[in-house]
Amino acid sequence: MNKRTLNQRILLVVILATGFAYGLGAQNVDSLFKVARDAAFERKDYATAIRLSKEVLRVSPGYTDVVTFLGRLYTWNKQPDSARQYFNEALRQQPDSENAFTGLADMEYWTGNYAPALIAADNGLKQYPRSETLLLRKAQVLYAQKEYAAAIPVLDTLLQVNKKNSEARRLAVQIQDHIARNAIGVKYDYIHFDQQFPDPWHLASIDYTRHTKAGAFTARVNYANRFATEGLQYELESYPRFSKTFYGYLNMGYSDNNVVFPKWKAGASLFANLPRAFEAELGVRYLYFNKDIFMYTLYAGKYYNSFLFGARTFLTPQTSSIAQTYSVMARYYFGGPNDYIGVLLGSGLSPDDVRSNVQLNSGYKMRNYNGEINARFSIQQLNIITGSFSLLNQEYLPGQKGNQLQFGLGYIRRF
């Protein structure tokens, strides 16, 4: 038994002894309620928390916060009938209790009773139309009922109330995958060199994506005009879902021109959506020009309010060393999941960047530093515009450096 738990039990004994001798006064009632909350939140001891809360209600039966808390306790203890009884009693005592509406909606939702959960959320929203918790719960219930179109305006309202709500943004992405299962995208990039090459590079792509219950699947054709020659690359890509926590990334590509593209490319990653709005990735990439190149990647990201922060590395084993690529990024969401502006700073080349990964075929170990600004915004949810601008400073030969400027523009239509 730790010191904190011992002190709480001593306090409990003092409170109960005083209460039985003189009757529980308001101060002792509040102190006993605090002990009950500590038992629930710190030790997950719901049985003790229920007993103490009932002792408080024995003295103060109109203590609505405690009645609502008992509803929560019975919910966590998987006793929905008792939980429902206490939530309804709390609403009888205080018909405009936001906590009671929220607790009742949560309990019904977690037990799979979507119709009463929606009723509880709607009743609460009549009193508190801008309640983030109730709006999110209503959207989640509608999503569970596959009423995707009805959930969209609820999430729009929630993001107007708080554009920093990352849970709402994630749910909006999932809903979009259901209501618009298909997408066609086109993109063009122009790359100018001030030293390294006399002619600019031109890259373009067109892709088709299909969203299914198993994940998203994409077929893509890339075109490039660089090194005074043209070529095509064909790619297949997927993001299979394994659970609510884990999903994957698979990619394979082929080109008949290994001057402007790798002849073969492949990639595989495992992603995890972690608690406290963290995310992580562990993966491998493969390129083949006239020899095999394997690169291993690690990524960690964190959603914070309206921001996503991330850091990534690519590690490439070589004969006597490990080549290292690093990048950090930040993204600010100013609307829905497809409305953001981001920045990226890095050192080294990424095998995932079709604009520059062909330079990994160089026999010279190039040092470079790059920065990028990118943006994405939606028009009526189904039309998405993308744009980017980047600057890369590269040592392409010993003692010789040059800059390359990139401008990119893209359009995605979901249907």
Image (cartoon, grey):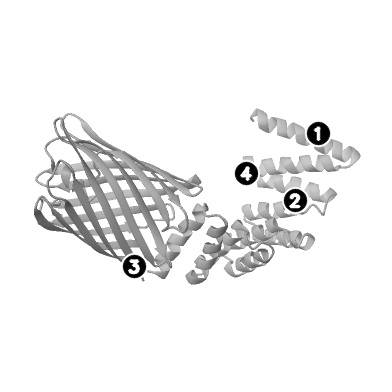
Q: Is residue 108 visible?
A: yes
- Residue at left 77%, top 60%? 94
Along the horizontal axis of the image, is 226 left or right of 65? left
Q: Which residue is mark 2?
A: 66
What residue is shown with label 1?
Answer: 14
Measure the alpha-carbon separation of dots 1 and 3.
67 Å
User: Which amino acid lies under the numbered mark 3 shown in the image of this protein?
Assistant: Arg
Element carrying mark 2: helix
Who comes first in sequence, dot 1 or dot 3?
1
Asked whether disc 3 touches disc 4, contact meaning CB atoms under 8 Å apart, the reply is no
Q: Secondary structure at mark 4?
A: loop
Q: Earlier in the sequence, mark 4 or mark 2?
A: 4
Q: Are marks 1 and 4 in contact (CB under 8 Å)?
A: no
Q: Which residue is mark 4?
A: 44
Q: Residue at x 69, y 64 (%)?
A: 127
**Disc 1 secondary structure class:** helix
Residue receiving disc 3: 413
Q: Position of residue 155 (x, y in %)?
A: 52, 62
The residue closer to the viewer here, 225 or 98, is 225
Q: Amino acid at mark 1?
A: Val
Callout 2 amino acid: Val
Q: From where the camera sits, is residue 351 visible?
A: no
Rendered position, 338 above or below 413: above
Q: Residues within 10 Å of mark 4 (few under 14, many from 20)?
A: some
Q: Which mark is residue 295?
A: none
Label 4 and label 2: CA atoms lie apart by 17 Å
Look at 39% across and 69% down and name the residue there. Answer: 180
